Image (spheres, grey):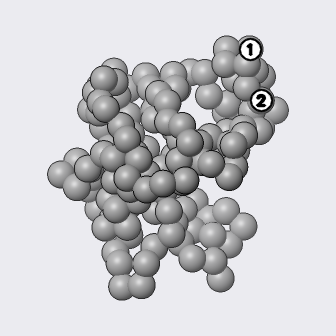
Amino acid sequence: LSVPTYGAVLIDPTYEHVLLVRGFYNRESWGFPKGKVQENESPLKCAIREVLEEVGFDMKDRAFEDQYLERDLNGQLIRLYIVKQVPLDTKFAPKTKNEIKEMRWFPIDDLPCHRHDTTPQIKLNLNAKAFFMVI
């Protein structure tokens, strides 16, 4: 059984953009900020800690226990809390070294709906496979 991961979907006030991150070691893939839960840590506290570490955004007053998306991906639980009204001009900065290489707002309409979707190739010059954690 894999260790569960928790994080967040940060959404701008227009509901048109989401913040995605790209790690140092998985340079081709974009995903939502998230990480593994520590012993005796609640899912929400884990998500708050991971988002703060990875992008420098404190979501503790913006995330709610009952507002999340959850998926089992090959035996690993992934839960992403929905955090709305994050301004596009928010200054993000990772708190940890050598974990997050880049973070960027992406228009939701440019992201793939399935792994064979050509939208990101056309609009972003990126393969849909680069977003497999987003689909």
Q: Is residue 110 above or below residue 21?
A: above
Identify the residue at image location x=29%, y=62%: 65
Type of amino acid under label 2: Asn
Identify the residue at image location x=54%, y=54%: 99
- Badge number at residue 122: 1
Residue 16 horizontal side relative to residue 29, left or right:
left
Q: Is residue 119 visible?
A: no
Residue highlighted by disc 2: 127
Q: Is residue 115 above or below residue 74?
A: above
Residue 40 horizontal side relative to residue 125, left or right:
left
In the picture as drawn, the residue positioned furthest to the right comes out as 116
Check disc 1 and report its element: helix, strand or loop.
helix
Check disc 2 and report its element: helix, strand or loop.
loop
- Badge number at residue 88: none
Identify the residue at image location x=30%, y=37%: 84
Residue 73 horizontal side relative to residue 104, left or right:
right
Residue 103 horizontal side relative to residue 135, left or right:
left
